[in-house]
Image (cartoon, rainbow, N blue to C red):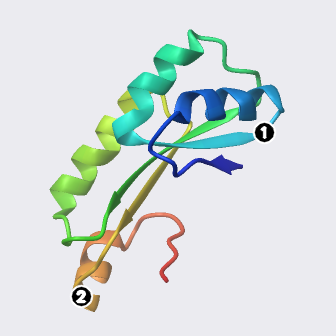
Amino acid sequence: MVSVMDKNNKSPLLTLAMQLRANSIDVELENVHEFNDSMDGKKPDKFKVIVSSHNFHNTPTAEAIADLVTRIQATGADIVKISTTALDIKDYGKHFSGYGTFSSK
């Protein structure tokens, strides 16, 4: 997997990663439309695009998370990745129980 954190010149680096046969690429939600435009529908078979969103400032509501998942899925993402902060351990259990695998740092 390739994840590019540099805010400048992401699309050329992501394109290069695809050309070098990376199996997946992680694109931030705020940049996914630029990335999709640069690909012009030329995504290799068996290649996965992970679209991620990061929020470390507050704990979103369950409704906000559901809306975010819908927005990310609408981009054509193969995998949805959301990173957020649970300001209280109760937030974690309340919002994330019943979902797949989660990791915490």
Residues at marks 2 and 1, CA–CA distance in whole angstroms: 38 Å
Q: Do the residues labelled 2 and 1 touch (CB within 8 Å)?
A: no
Q: Is 42 situated above or below 48?
A: above
Furthest-right residue in view? 20
- The residue at the point 43 percent across, 23 percent down is 34
**Residue 46 falls left or right of residue 84:** right
Up-down: is 84 above or below 24?
below
First in residue order: circle 2 vs circle 1 = 1
Residue position for label 2: 90
> Pointer 1: what residue?
22
Query: Where is residue 71 drawn, in percent x and y?
Result: 30, 36
Q: How crowded is mark 1: few (under 14 residues within 10 Å), some or many (20 or more)?
A: some
Residue 25 rendering spot, x and y as whole percentages = 63, 41
Kindly identify the residue that appears in the image at 48 percent across and 80 percent down.
Answer: 104
Question: Which residue lies at the image location 38% right of the left edge and 40% below the top edge?
Answer: 29
Q: Residue 28: x and y, percent?
A: 43, 44
- Which is more toward the observer, 84 or 16? 16
Q: What element carries label 1?
A: loop
Q: Residue at x 66, y 36 (%)?
A: 48
- Classify residue 65 as left or right of residue 82: left
* Quadrant in which residue 93 is drawn: bottom left
> Which percent across, then down, holds residue 76?
47, 27
